[in-house]
Amino acid sequence: MSWYVDDFMLSLADKSEHTRRAYRGDVETLKVWADRDEEMTLQGLDHAALRRFLSFQRTLGRSERSVARRAAGIRAYFSWLTKSGKIESDPAANLRAPANTRRLPIVPKEIEAEFILDDAAQRVRSTSIPGDQKEQELRARLLMEHAILELLYGAGLRVSELCGLTWTDYDSQNHTLTVLGKGSKYRRLPLHQAACSALEKYLDEGRPHLDRSLAGRSVFLNRTAKRMNPRDVRRILGKYPLPDGRVLHPHQWRHAFATHLLRGGADVRVVQELLGHADVETTQLYTHLTKDHVRSVYEATHPRA
């Protein structure tokens, strides 16, 4: 029987390569499972069958988070099948992952974020006015690393958004940054003064020494003067550990951006817009963290707590 996998992939043209690859894997895994029953057809897969498939994934030792992500791929697939007329009704419309599958993200404290940013700024200040080309490139890289850290925390960027920045994305007059996010959607983000200063200093004094031709459009460059990739960013963050030796992942900076805004009183809808979340439920994950913070403060300060 035809599962229309290639047609489904074409419908995901606006999704990231990572998402397309994951969804293809979800559908193909479901197909292998269904093919074990010679009488099973695509049209015959009902809600109960899909639930059995997810249960089977758990028996294979898949983590709850992995099963939850697989359920999302199956929902997207059957939604497309229904809308394109391949099947009459959607058996996955209410397919849900097991309860309590999402772990709360590990978020650095405000003082930990400040420690790393201060460290990056101090490294820049400690460099002398460069003389030869080697010294110029060293200082340029320190300026770039400081700018990257400030943007990750100051704008809550996904690492892919950071790597995709070009010269024209930064508006120095209005102190805003335009980023291309998931689903090929643009959003304009405000930047605080520290982030603007770090970025401008890098663009003026650092980047020209990393790409002397100035022909490239990418803001951040690796050691071969090519557009920086996520692995390059993770390598940079490894150079800025916390005092206890922990190294923050790029996405932990994004978590910190959202959580610290909410703790400061920001509206969840505003944070949703800043993060580029299509669904406010995704943003509300961070409200659990702030509620925990509120309770800890309450218990530590109320005389009868």
Image (cartoon, helix red, strand yellow):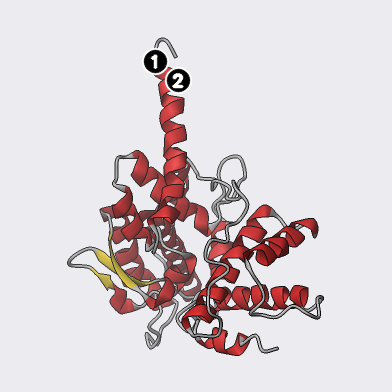
Q: Is residue 60 visible?
A: yes
Disc 1 crowd rating (10 Å Cα; few below 14, some 14-19, many 20+) is: few
Mark 1 falls on what kind of element? loop
The amino acid at mark 2 is: Glu
Quadrant of the image for the C terminus?
top left
Quadrant of the image occupied by residue 70: bottom right
* Residue matched to label 2: 299
Q: Which mark is residue 117?
A: none
Image height of 260 relative to 129, above or below: above
Q: Position of residue 50 (x, y in %)?
A: 66, 66
Q: Is residue 118 visible?
A: no
Q: Position of residue 198 (x, y in %)?
A: 34, 60
For the residue pair 272 and 47, the one nearer the viewer reads as 47
| Residue 174 relative to residue 42: left or right | left
Q: Which mark is residue 302?
A: 1
Q: Residue at x 41, y 83 (%)?
A: 212
Q: Position of residue 241 (x, y in %)?
A: 57, 49
Q: Residue at x 38, y 55 (%)?
A: 280
Q: What whole-number distance in Å separates the C-alpha atoms at marks 1 and 2?
A: 6 Å
Q: Are marks 1 and 2 in contact (CB under 8 Å)?
A: yes
Q: Residue at x 48, y 77 (%)?
A: 15
Mark 2 falls on what kind of element? helix
For the residue pair 158 and 79, the one nearer the viewer reads as 79
Work out which residue is located at the far left of the displayed protein and give it: 173
The amino acid at mark 1 is: His
